[in-house]
Image: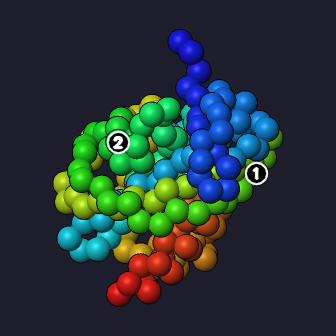
Amino acid sequence: MEEEKVILVNEQDEQIGLMPKMEAHEKALLHRAFSVFIFNDNNELMLQQRALDKYHSPGLWTNTCCSHQRDGESNLQAGKRRLNEEMGFTVDLKESISFIYKAPFDNGLTEHEYDHVMIGHYNEEPEINPDEVAHWKWMSLEDIKADIALNSNMYTEWFKVIFDKFYEYINVKS
């Protein structure tokens, strides 16, 4: 099976090429990605704990799902596809903010992503894919913010960056 490729982009999110995912992470090249945030009627965010055998950030808590768009796939198509693959459900998603971040890992890989945040709504229990997700839970934004302050090492690097930006964004809107 051919390794999945990521979409290399410039700082304007214009596609400049394709590269195998691991190579892009080894070379820390800017590539397109997305992060899905699913809320319930209580305005709680569905978090997932990454599977324990993931190649980076195993066992850490993060947003509902995240991944990389495939060549020719829209942000919304990619978000729905991956939400179903990881969490076992699909919902309508709405694009929110996007931004660039860079996060190096201890294993020599680096996430350097032009990340598109998408928001959806769901009230049921997910049917998690155990190859991708160890556990899941609902948490309020205030509780997440407090827990990240106390237990920063329990969350993925990108989630901490995204959550900070996302939290500020939704507070501006309220």
Q: What amino acid is at disc 1? A: Pro
Q: Can residue 2 be seen in this view?
A: yes
Q: Where's residue 54, x and y in %?
A: 58, 36
Q: Which of 69 and 168 is in front in this view?
A: 69
Label 1: state its secondary structure: strand
Q: What amino acid is at disc 2? A: Gln
Q: How crowded is mark 2: few (under 14 residues within 10 Å), some or many (20 or more)?
A: some
Residue at position x 47%, y 78% from top?
Answer: 169
162 lies above or below 20: below
C-alpha separation, residue under disc 1 versus residue under disc 2: 28 Å
Q: Nearer the viewer, residue 106 or 85?
A: 85
Residue at position x 36%, y 66% from top?
Answer: 45
In the picture of the structure, the residue carrying the numbered disc 1 is 104
Camera-side mark, 1 or 2: 2
Q: Quarter of the image containing the C terminus?
A: bottom left
Residue 114 in the figure: left or right of residue 95: right
Lower position in the chain sequence, tag 1 or tag 2? 2
Label 2: state its secondary structure: helix
Q: Quadrant of residue 148?
A: bottom right
Q: Can residue 111 be seen in this view?
A: no
As drawn, the residue found furthest toward the top would be 1
Residue 108 in the figure: left or right of residue 11: right
